[in-house]
Amino acid sequence: MTTRRVASIATMIWLSNSTLARLRDQLQARGQRPSIVASPGMTPETAELMTIIAEYGPLCEAMYLMMSADGKISNEEREVLKGALRNLSGDTIRTAHMESMLDTAGKNVADQGRDARMKEVVEQLHDDKTRAEVAFVLAAAIAFADNAIADEENETLNTLAEGLGIDEARANELLDDVETDLSGQQGSASS
């Protein structure tokens, strides 16, 4: 993927509802993640949070890595992340869960460094092609959220694609799918 390719679709600020619905459906169609085994004394709230973190934590952290790539996190990027997680989860993830995952992602990057966290996220997602592609599309949406794609964001997107085993042709195809969805959404908004 080249800087020119990413810049050519910089108008993709928000993922359309149809894109998010398609991603959500892909995640659901691949099957549910294994259940979390509750330990004695575990509250239902803790079990719920563990389940959410197991399913959505790596996706959230991939988006966080993109958000923080250029050294600043914009409100637009945070809103894209929150909207994507809400839609992907069918509104089961509460704001408190999202904030907890974001705080954990930030702490992990501060403690272990970006490269180590990228490696961990890639390891968590690599063997699940559907989740890997969803993470890539979500990270791209974060990169486009503030109307400016920094070199660090483009590099992060390329690193993510490479680590997840998404070749350049497939990466461009995924980005084209989102662009097509958004073009259709914009076309219907002007009708």
Image (cartoon, grey):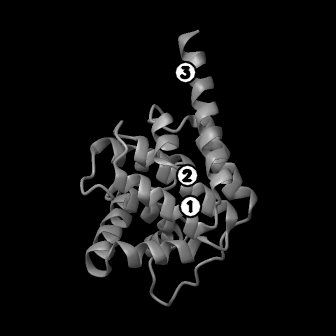
**Residue 20 visible in the shown view:** yes
The residue wearing badge 2 is 1
The residue lying toward the viewer, choosing from 129 and 169, is: 169
For image coordinates 43% across by 60% down, the residue present is 156
Amino acid on which disc 3 is placed: Gln
Q: Which of marks 1 and 2 is in front?
A: 2
Compared across the picture, whether 86 is left or right of 178 comes to left
Which of the numbered marks, if any, corresponds to residue 148? none
Secondary element under disc 2, as helix, strand or loop, is loop
Q: Which amino acid does label 1 sit on?
A: Ala
Is the C-beta separation of discs 1 and 2 under 8 Å?
A: yes
Q: Residue 147 location, x and y as percent? A: 36, 36
The mark that comes first in sequence, 1 or 2, is: 2
Q: Can residue 85 be seen from the camera position used here?
A: no
Place of residue 102 in the rendered image (x, y in percent of width and height, measured from the top left): 34, 63
Label placed on residue 161: 1
User: Which badge, 3 or 1, comes first in the chain's sequence?
Assistant: 1
Q: Report x, y in % for residue 8.
A: 49, 35
Q: Which amino acid does label 2 sit on?
A: Met
Q: Label 3: few (<14), some or many (≥20) within 10 Å?
A: few
Q: Which of the two discs, 2 and 3, labels the residue nearer the N terminus?
A: 2
Horizontal side of 78 relative to 173 (left or right) equals left
In space, the residues marked 1 and 2 are separated at their CA atoms by 9 Å
Label 3 near label 2: C-beta < 8 Å? Answer: no
**Res. 186 mark:** 3
- Crowd rating for badge 2 (residues with CA inside 10 Å; few <14, some 14–19, many 20+): some
Q: Quadrant of residue 114?
A: bottom left
- Quick one: quadrant of the C terminus? top right
CA–CA distance in space, label 3 to label 1: 27 Å
